[in-house]
Structures are given as structure tokens and as C-alpha cells.
Image (cartoon, rainbow, N blue to C red):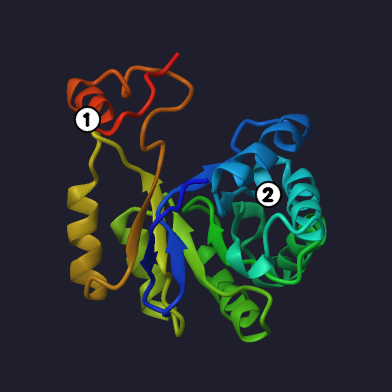
Amino acid sequence: MTTIPSFTMHNGIDIPALGYGVFQMTSDQVREHLPQALELGYRHIDTANAYFNEVAVGEVVRGAIAAGTVKREDLFITSKLFPQSYPYEQAVKDIDATLERLGLDYLDLLLFHQPYGEYVSGWKAMEEAVAAGKVRSIGLSNFPITKFQEILDVATIKPVVNQVEAHPRWNQHELKAQMDRAAGAEILVEAWYPLGHGDKTLLEEPAIAAAAQRTGAPRPR
């Protein structure tokens, strides 16, 4: 089993540096492959309301805990609310619905998935979920700096991450610099699509292939 390093977020909670995303996986695929990921050492699992597989993720997680494969406190579970959930009263309900679908008492990280709709007013519901112990950390996903700043302007609890597309062909250095200026380098950039999404082109980049060869990582098939 591989040990995965972690980063400490500004609220003092550690987030594993490598996560297992279930985007575009069917529920049956989650049930088949997520247990394998847990066996390999993954502890950070990333799902979302819009993926329609939270129930399956919860089944696997609860099953692994019951079997003694993992402890809940060793897992880092992320989910995301879609813009339809952002209005305050709806967000309050949908946070509870997310936990119900997963069958968990709390989430380690909950994100606003896209920068549309009533994300500014809805942030209050996210903060209340932290205060109630339903969510340990809250953050954003796919937020450009202007909309990121709108959240900072109203937040009493700052986002811990902004999860955006980031990889060797789109490094997001400019966004990271903008976020650092706005928030004092407190908020992490979390990458989705770091090594491609089902294709091999990024893994075949010479620098990545050379690094894989140096470390003995298997070549993509």
C-alpha cells in the first residue's frame, strides 16, 4: 500500500495530496473500482452531486469502515454542490441531502462546484454547516479570481481550496498568484485533470515519461 503525502490547509486540517475522483463513473464502476483504490492507499475521495454516484461512494466507504479496511478519521471525503443548490434555504437542505446520500455524519470538504447562481448568499449555509459539524472544511471549484473575491468579501470562514483544472499544459500560475494577493497565500489550488482524463497524451509528455522512468512507475496502457 502506498503512503500519500498531504498538505495542511489554513484551518489546520490535512488534505491528501492525491485524490481518487469518480467523475463520469457509474455507480457500478464506483462499487467495483473504489475498493481497489482504498486497497492501494487512496484516502481522499472526490465526488459531487452532479456525478450521481454519491450513494455508491457512501456504500463503499461504509463497507470498508465496517470491514476494518479503513477508519473514518483516516478518510478525506469531498463532495460538491451544483449551482441549483446555492440559494441559502436550498443549500441548507441539499447539504443534509448530500450527507444522507453518502450515509455519513460529516464531510471533510464541501465545495461550490461552479461559479454561477447565488453563490455569494449561499456561502452562509456552508459556514453554518461547518459550525454544526456537518462539514469540516469548505471551498470552491472552478472559480476565477473575480468571483473568488466575491466570496472572500462576505466570508467569515474563508475557502480552504479552489479546485480548478491544472496540469502541465495549463499550470494556473496566474490564478495562484491572484489568489495569493487576495488571500495572503492561505488558500490552496487543488488540481483536477492533473495527468489527463482517460487519455494518454499528458502521460506521454517527455518530462512526465522521464520522471516515470526514474521512479519506476508503470507506463500507461
> Which residue is painted at 54% across and 72% down in the image?
123
* Nearest the eye: 73 or 92: 73
Quarter residue 33 falls in? top right
- x, y (%) of residue 37? 60, 41
Give the distance between the C-alpha atoms of the residues marked 1 and 2, in whole angstroms: 39 Å
Quarter residue 218 falls in? top left
> Measured along the vertical axis of the image, is residue 3 above or below residue 106?
above
In the picture provided, is 14 more to the left or to the right than 47?
Answer: left
* Nearest the eye: 102 or 36: 36
Q: Amino acid at mark 2?
A: Asn
Q: Secondary structure at mark 2?
A: helix
* Nearest the eye: 217 or 52: 217
> Measured along the vertical axis of the image, is residue 127 above or below residue 42?
below
Q: Amino acid at mark 1?
A: Arg
> Which residue is painted at 52% across and 72% down in the image?
137
- x, y (%) of residue 46? 57, 49
- x, y (%) of residue 76? 57, 61
Which mark's residue is nearer the viewer, 1 or 2?
Answer: 1
Q: Earlier in the sequence, mark 1 or mark 2?
A: 2
Q: Secondary structure at mark 1?
A: helix
In the picture provided, is 1 more to the left or to the right than 48?
Answer: left
> Which residue is painted at 44% across and 69% down in the image?
14
Using a 10 Å C-alpha cutoff, classify the residue at mark 2 as few (fewer than 14 neighbours), some (14 to 19) or many (20 or more). some
How many marks overall? 2
Verify CB contact (< 8 Å) between mark 1 and mark 2.
no
Which numbered tag is attached to residue 31? Answer: none
Which residue lies under the disc numbered 2?
Answer: 49
- x, y (%) of residue 174? 18, 51
In the picture provided, is 55 more to the left or to the right than 152?
Answer: right
Which residue lies under the disc numbered 1?
Answer: 214
Image quarter (top left, top right, bottom left or bottom right) of the C terminus: top left
